[in-house]
Amino acid sequence: MEILRFILKWLDENAEKVVIIISYAAMAGIIFVEVIRRFFFNVQAPWSTTVPILLFLWLTWFGCSYNIKKRTHLALTEIRARLPYKLQFAALAFDAVLWIVFAIIVIFYTWQQVYNSYDNFAIVGGTNDVKEWWFYLATPLAWTLIIVRVIQNFLEDLKLYKSGKPFVLQGLLNE
């Protein structure tokens, strides 16, 4: 049980970071190697222009989740900070509801895209056997994680509200 708790805590702290670093390193590595191959050896892997773009899906959507976790996403912080305490909480609760509703819509439609890609055996351009749905899966997975992060933030806000402590309206990436 202690191992499971350790794994879940580690995933909670590092899931987005790991996905971001791996996808960014893979994108940069592919692009770097293929630019060298193209200019010095006049050859290029046919998939080298499509895979980095598809890896960008993983980078951006998990980056979005990370920013929500850290509260560094775009927000109307200046306006919210000037509101009375109860209205600040109401605004944070409304934000959470909007995020979750939007995430459900995104998950619903992107899951259809993943399924269609899977069902039609869609292959990444320039490859023989790399499935597109592997990359498209990034969007519904990351948006599911976004829901988790929004709920975590809201529970933290609720605890602060009940104790009367000031809200964390905007975080820093280095925290």
Image: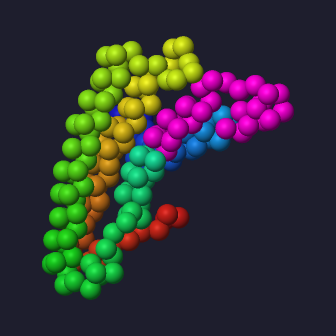
**Which quarter of the rendered picture does the N terminus lie within?**
top left
Main SS class of the magenta portion in the image: helix
Q: In this view, which residue lies farthest toward the front?
A: 42
x then y, percent, for residue 121: 39, 15
Q: Is residue 114 above or below residue 65?
A: above
The residue stretch that appears in magenta:
31-59
Residue at 32%, 52% in the rendered image: 149
Q: Position of residue 7 (x, y in %)?
A: 43, 38
Q: Residue at x 73, y 37 (%)?
A: 35
Would you say residue 2 is visible in this rendering? no
Quarter of the image for residue 104 reads top left
Residue nearest the viewer, comparing 138 with 146: 138
Could you say where residue 136 lies in the image, as x and y percent from the top left? 40, 32
Residue 134 sits in which quadrant?
top left
Residue 75 visible in image: yes
Residue 154 is left or right of residue 73, and the answer is left
Depicted 147 relative to depicted 78: above or below? above
